[in-house]
Image (cartoon, grey):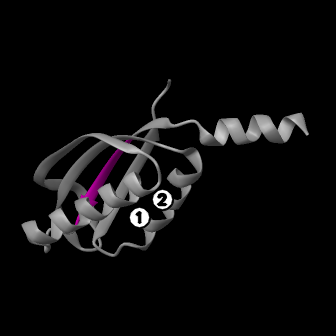
Amino acid sequence: MASTEVTKVIEERLQSYELVFIISPEDDDEAVETIIDNLNKFITDGGGAISNIERWGKRKLAYPIKRFLEGNYVLAQFTLKPASSRQLEANLRIYEDILRYLLVKLSS
C-alpha cells in the first residue's frame, strides 16, 4: 500500500521540460500561432505552466522531411506532470502540421 502512495506523489510532482518542434513551412503566421496556443492550452489545462516560448522562424532543414526543405522552428520551456507529458507526445504525433518534435525532460 505504501508503494502506491509513493507512486502517486511522484506522478503529482511537476517536471521541467523543453520542447522543440518544427511546423510545416506552408502554414502562415496565424496557423503557427494557433498551434502554439493549442500547446499552451494543453499544458495549462494539464496543471503545468509555460515559462518561455521562442519562435525561431523559418530555417533550412538538415534533410528533407515530408518533402519539405525548411520549417518553422519553435522552442518551448515548461513544467508539467509526467503523465501529461506522455499525452502531450501522443498529441504531437497526431498533429499533421508538426513535422518533427523533441521533448526533453530537464534534470531537477
Q: Of helix, strand and loop, which one carries label 1? A: helix
Q: Which residue is mark 1?
A: 92
Q: Quadrant of the N terminus?
A: top right
| Residue highlighted by disc 2 | 89
Foreground of the two, 24 or 38: 38
Task: Locate residue 25 relative to residue 15 in the image: left or right.
Answer: left
Task: Name the residue located 46 percent from the left edge and 58 percent from the top edge.
Answer: 88
Labels 2 and 1 touching (C-beta < 8 A):
yes
Q: Position of residue 56 (x, y in %)?
A: 13, 47
Measured along the vertical axis of the image, is residue 94 above or below residue 52? Answer: below
Q: Is residue 21 magenta?
A: yes
Up-down: is 12 above or below 63? above
* Image location of residue 43, percent across then percent down: 39, 53
Indicate yes or no whether the magenta region holds residue 11. Answer: no
What secondary structure prevails in the magenta region?
strand
* Neighbours of disc 2 within 10 Å: few (<14), some (14-19), many (20+): some
Q: Which residues are magenta?
A: 18-23
Q: Amino acid at mark 2?
A: Glu
**Residue found at x 17% / y 65%:** 32
Asked if residue 58 shows in the view, the reply is yes
What's the distance in space between the residues labelled 2 and 1, CA to CA?
Answer: 5 Å
The answer to which of 16 and 69 lies nearer the viewer is 16
